[in-house]
Image: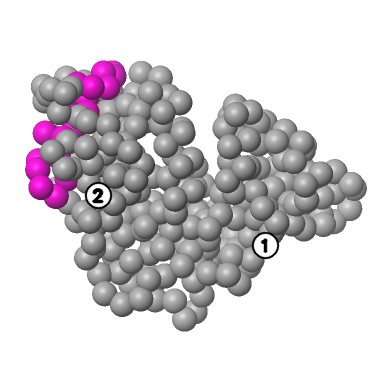
Amino acid sequence: MSQPDIRFARKEDVPRLTALWQDAFGDSQDYIDRFFGLFLHPDSCLAAEVDGKLVSAMYLMDGPLLFPPSGRSLSTTYTYALATDPAYQGQGIGTAVYKACVDAALERSDAACVLPAEKALYPFYERAASCKPVSQVRQAVLTRDQVAPGRAEDAVSVSLGEYYLRRKAILRGRPYALMTRDMFTLEQYQMQRFGGGFISVDGDIAAVEMDGDACRVLELLAPEADWMDVLAAVAARFPAARYELRTPLFFPGPGEERPFILATVRPDAPLLALPGLWWGFAFD
């Protein structure tokens, strides 16, 4: 086998990129089209070609700004959706593509960030590009019986713009990631597609996504109320067998603390001095 040629994807690569994505993640054509429409631009996807065939790809998205409690904000590039043709896996091609993405990301931002799809993949990314955790999350899974009774009318849908502004206000002065509008737009589409949305409960907020018999509360931000009161209202509006809940370390919440986002940083970026950084939803 020839050595892989790693290059930026071109317009004519879109059919093959689509096939790789569908084989790896099983997403719909509509979702892929929306993602490509928002994020597939020149120099936004690195691909590996072997003997004329595109066999692996990963995407570079303008990531959120990271805000420490004081000091300057830090720019990020979010590396996303690494996929390799099964016939070419185990040969280091995906690793090479990811490393190339990190190099490209650090030329344009303070940090290259990634969210491993599952716990077992964290060591892979840490080894591949010297990634370290820069964001933590508190995570819990509760059954319907463990959630207090609530009123569905207390969980009010809000627009993307309202949620965006309320989120900024709640998180100001704490270490957090300010998502781009394109990230919000794609997440809103995904939540609405499966019957969720951006929700406010007396000014506290939650981003909700349905997934089969589970309700995924991708972020619950409740500095002004008991988190259970907010979840109770969400659960009344979105009935489910179980609730997967994520909350920041600096607000009360249930569950265990664990690493979330990994990052490779430029030497001059003080990114690792952000304990408890809240990232929020990440297309996971």
Q: Is residue 21 left or right of residue 223?
A: right
Quick one: 76 or 92, which is closer to the camera? 76
SS class of the residue under badge 1?
helix
Which is nearer the N-term, disc 1 or disc 2? Answer: 1
What is the x, y in percent for residue 32? 61, 35
Quick one: 27 or 53, which is closer to the camera? 27
- According to the picture, the residue beneath numbered tag 2 turns out to be 166
- According to the picture, the residue beneath numbered tag 1 turns out to be 100
Does the image show residue 146?
no
Q: Is residue 116 magenta?
A: no
Q: Amino acid at mark 2?
A: Arg
**Number of numbered discs on residues:** 2
> In the image, is residue 275 above or below residue 150?
below
Quick one: 142 or 79, which is closer to the camera? 79
Dot 1 crowding, Cα within 10 Å, few <14, some 14–19, many 20+: some
Q: Quadrant of residue 26?
A: top right
Q: Which residues are magenta?
A: 222-241
Q: Residue at x 72, y 33 (%)?
A: 19
What is the x, y in percent for residue 46? 70, 55
Q: Amino acid at mark 1?
A: Ala
Q: Residue at x 38, y 64 (%)?
A: 66
Q: Residue at x 29, y 44 (%)?
A: 162
Instruction: Name the residue furthest bottom.
Output: 268
> In the image, is residue 200 above or below residue 143?
below
SS class of the residue under badge 2?
helix
What is the x, y in percent for residue 134? 38, 62
What is the x, y in percent for residue 281? 39, 45
